[in-house]
Image: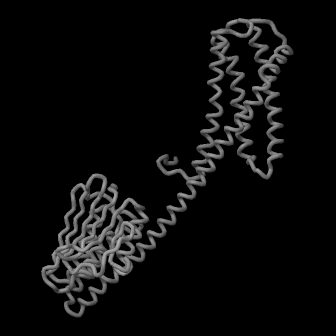
Amino acid sequence: MTNSSLPLTIADEGARLRRLTRVLFASIWVVPSSLAALQLTVVGDTSGVHYGIGTALLWQGSAWMLWGLWSQLILTLVDRVQLDTARVLPWLALHAGFTVMISAANVLAIAWLDHVFGAVGQVTTYAFALRVVIVNHLDIQVVLYWAVLGAAYMVEFVRRYRERDRAAAELEQKLARTQLEALRMQLNPHFLFNALNSVAELMEMNVKEAQRTLIRVSDLLRLSLRSAGQSLIPVWQEIELVELYLQIARVRYGSGLDVDIDVDPNAVDLLVPSFLLQPIVENALKHGLAPGHPDQSIAVRLVRVGGSLEIVVEDNGKGLDGLLTTSGRFLAAVPSVDGLGIGLTNTRSRLAMLYGDRYAFRMSNQSTGGCRVDIRLPAQS
């Protein structure tokens, strides 16, 4: 059995719309047949004869529900014969022929119904009933044919438009996912190489510590692989990555590096882009702090404020060099964010692709020294 919760493909959605259209065009004729039956019961026919509700419903229902059959034929024609401006005359000729055929068949059928049911109130011949129907109803049959045809083409045009629109949206999403994955593939090796460089430096000084650090790198790689293919991961999982990275970083920066990570309980399960915090923390270490110096600190805070997740990363290092310039929603040191490395360049690109203009990213120097990064994202869970 097909799981109804699975998203429909474009073909499935088109087939479902076609089925719904056929059901609608088959059942809509219940409305005029009910009204006509009510009229015969309450007002009567032209001779003033009133009919019982059962007889009136059978009579008028049979007459009007014939269009439930004709509409299915018309829908089949619409499916198979496209309205092409280059072939208008053959299209008109086809539907003119079906107009004559369906109108004639319907007139003959209605005349027979009038002859049979009209005999309840008055004796009529079939020829007389046919003349009356031709005079009173032939033009209505032609109008009904072209009205159904127009409505069917309108639904078909809507279906095609939705298919093209959805196909374009799916293509755009695939391109975005491909670009995001390319950015992740660029970021992860950069991140891993930096960690391995720390291990390589440590091998010359303390082999046992290098082994322990290599285990941490392995854990870090395992967590990274766990989130592979996921654009968004929970905050708690992102914090795990950052804490493991900081354990490796302390090998180089020493015990003088103080890190404070504060996460709002209401923000723990919110979704953030994977590897969002690590390159920002790495940037603080690389550009703001110096290995071996005492009293160096990094503070990371994540707080949910209404419908937003606010992230702050601060350090007490030397801060950003150069003047701050505005670039859209991103403030960076001149000449551009590219000068700050792969991590932050990718961070900006990924945020823009994931959130469009619904995010804010600001880098600034603090008056007390050091750099501050402020990020605001839509709260998603």
The percent coordinates of residue 189 (x first, y second) are 38, 79
Taking 267 as reference, is 88 left or right? right
Viewer can see residue 61: yes
Examine the rendered structure and indicate whether residue 27 appears above or below residue 183.
above
Given residues 126 and 372, the one toward you in this image is 372
Q: Is residue 341 left or right of residue 124?
A: left
Q: Position of residue 346 (x, y in %)?
A: 39, 73
Way the structure is coloured: one colour
Identify which residue, 300 or 123, lies in the foreground. 300
Left or right of residue 337, residue 171 in this image? right
Where does residue 187 sit, x and y in percent of width and height? 38, 76
Report the residue at 38% width, 71% height from top: 327
The answer to whether 301 is drawn above or below residue 325 in the figure is above
- Please name the residue shown 37% across and 80% down the image: 335
Taking the view exactly as shown, the residue that stands out farthest to the bottom is 204
Q: Name the quarter where the C terminus is drawn.
A: bottom left
Viewer can see residue 189: no
Residue drawn 29% across the image and 59% down it: 309
Q: Is residue 267 above or below residue 20?
A: below
Q: Nearer the viewer, residue 372 or 321?
A: 321
Task: Give residue 298's quadrant in the image.
Answer: bottom left
Question: x%, y% of residue 211?
Answer: 24, 84
Q: Residue at x 23, y 89 (%)?
A: 202
Q: Is residue 141 left or right of residue 259?
A: right
Query: In the picture shown, does residue 27 fall above or below 258?
Result: above
Residue 127 appears in which quarter of the rendering? top right
User: Furthest residue to the right?
Assistant: 127
Count of numbered tags: 0
